[in-house]
Image (spheres, rainbow, N blue to C red):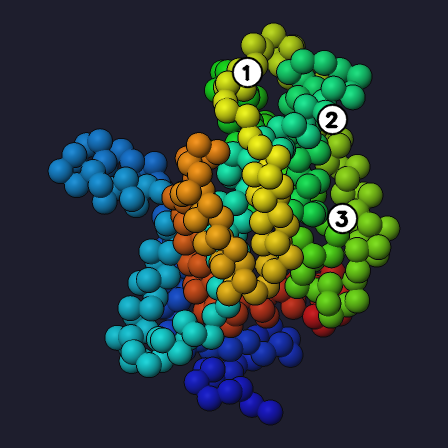
């Protein structure tokens, strides 16, 4: 059968492969995607403009935020679709996109970044660090980089990233790290979070995309990928800890601030909300309802909370939503490219 109406004409590529000639909207989408990539690496330029032109510093600071880049250009795409194809076409396209992942990331980041969850995570880190053959800052540092990313297999990768980043910020970055150690820490954390979520079949988005179709359950993930990923996470954390062991050992790690002790019911409630959000991660009506419940409790008992990270969560969600919108217009060139690459590696047709 031929392509769906409006999918564009077809012309031969190299050999027998057929690739689509893009429609006007697809061409605009590809161009805006390229502009967004350039913008992502140009945010420093807008920050400089904000200092050079204080009258418009606000808009330049906004354009200098990495997280808003794809959302802004996704908005430009929708505006272009309205002008070229009409409002109904643009709204129909938006309605066809699945925004469950951006909404979930927002919800889980806000709940995971709450003070009770952070204190539970800190308590777990202290217990694990105390059982290690090393002591002090190196033990705490290794634990945050090794064991917190592995939690991503159970509480999802966004939650693990939020907890690890907040602990590192408060305990290490606030105490002063060299730039080399800062970059090594962030790089190792990104890698470990990315691979630390494959111990189960329900936490990492790449696993979720195929687990149901290919029959991968948690037992299979543990046996096939999990132990390998866990080994890599531990090795990565051990390497960076060993490389900077002298700097870490000489650090005066910032102590945790004195706070009002949290009642056990508050800790249990927040832990239960976090687990429930993870359990219903594919049902926006449920996990957003749980988020509203969390916000209501946090407003009623502010003495048990630090600043809720609504801004950070919204920025990340906006970034992911922009990717969802812009990414939908890249299939015409990305899918043939991936198929050709897979076949060149002998993987057959995807």
Q: Earlier in the sequence, mark 1 or mark 3?
A: 3
Q: Which residue is mark 3?
A: 199
Name the outermost residue toward the left: 55
In the displayed structure image, the side of residue 298 where residue 283 appears, left or right: right
* Residue sitting at x 19%, y 32%: 52
Position of residue 342 relative to residue 38, above or below, is below
Alpha carbons under labels 1 and 2: distance apart: 17 Å
Q: Secondary structure at mark 2?
A: helix
Q: Which mark is residue 264?
A: none
* Residue sitting at x 73%, y 63%: 211
User: Which percent across, then down, holds residue 298?
Assistant: 45, 42
User: Which percent across, then down, holds residue 182?
Assistant: 53, 24
Q: Nearer the viewer, residue 216 or 4?
A: 216
Q: Which residue is mark 1?
A: 255
The crowd level at tag 3 (other Cα within 10 Å; few <14, some 14-19, many 20+) is many
Q: Secondary structure at mark 1?
A: loop
User: Which percent across, then down, holds residue 302?
Assistant: 42, 36
Q: Earlier in the sequence, mark 3 or mark 2?
A: 2
Q: Report if residue 313 is visible in the image.
A: no
* Residue sitting at x 49%, y 48%: 294
The crowd level at tag 1 (other Cα within 10 Å; few <14, some 14-19, many 20+) is few
Q: Quadrant of residue 236?
A: top right
In the displayed structure image, the side of residue 157 where residue 259 appears, left or right: left
Q: Nearer the viewer, residue 77 or 120?
A: 120
Q: Which residue is mark 2?
A: 128
């Amino acid at each position: 059968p031929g392509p769906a109406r409006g999918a564009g004409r077809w012309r031969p590529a190299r050999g027998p492969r057929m690739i689509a000639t893009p429609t006007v909207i697809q061409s605009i989408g590809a161009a805006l995607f390229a502009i967004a990539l350039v913008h992502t690496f140009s945010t420093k330029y807008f920050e400089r403009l904000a200092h050079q032109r204080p009258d418009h510093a606000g808009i330049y600071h906004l354009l200098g935020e990495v997280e808003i880049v794809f959302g802004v250009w996704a908005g430009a795409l929708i505006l272009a679709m309205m002008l070229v194809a009409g409002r109904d076409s643009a709204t129909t396209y938006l309605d066809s996109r699945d925004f469950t992942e951006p909404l979930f990331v927002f919800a889980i980041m806000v709940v995971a970044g709450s003070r009770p969850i952070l204190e539970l995570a800190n308590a777990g880190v202290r217990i694990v660090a105390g059982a290690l053959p090393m002591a002090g800052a190196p033990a705490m540092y290794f634990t945050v980089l090794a064991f917190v990313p592995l939690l991503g297999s159970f509480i999802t990768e966004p939650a693990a990233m939020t907890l690890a980043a907040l602990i590192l910020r408060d305990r290490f970055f606030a105490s002063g790290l060299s730039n080399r150690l800062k970059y090594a820490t962030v790089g190792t954390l990104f890698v470990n979070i990315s691979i630390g979520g494959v111990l189960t079949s329900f936490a990492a988005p790449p696993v979720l995309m195929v687990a149901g179709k290919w029959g991968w359950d948690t037992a299979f993930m543990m046996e096939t990928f999990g132990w390998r990923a866990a080994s890599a996470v531990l090795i990565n954390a051990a390497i960076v800890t060993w490389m900077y062991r002298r700097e870490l050992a000489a650090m005066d790690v910032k102590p945790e601030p004195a706070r009002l002790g949290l009642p056990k019911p508050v800790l249990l409630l927040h832990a239960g909300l976090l687990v429930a959000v993870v359990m219903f991660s594919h049902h926006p009506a449920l996990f957003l309802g749980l988020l509203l419940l969390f916000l209501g409790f946090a407003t009623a008992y502010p003495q048990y909370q630090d600043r809720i990270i609504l801004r950070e969560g919204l920025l990340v969600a906006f970034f992911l939503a922009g990717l969802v919108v812009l990414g939908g217009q890249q299939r015409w060139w990305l899918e043939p490219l991936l198929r050709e690459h897979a076949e060149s590696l002998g993987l057959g047709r995807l």
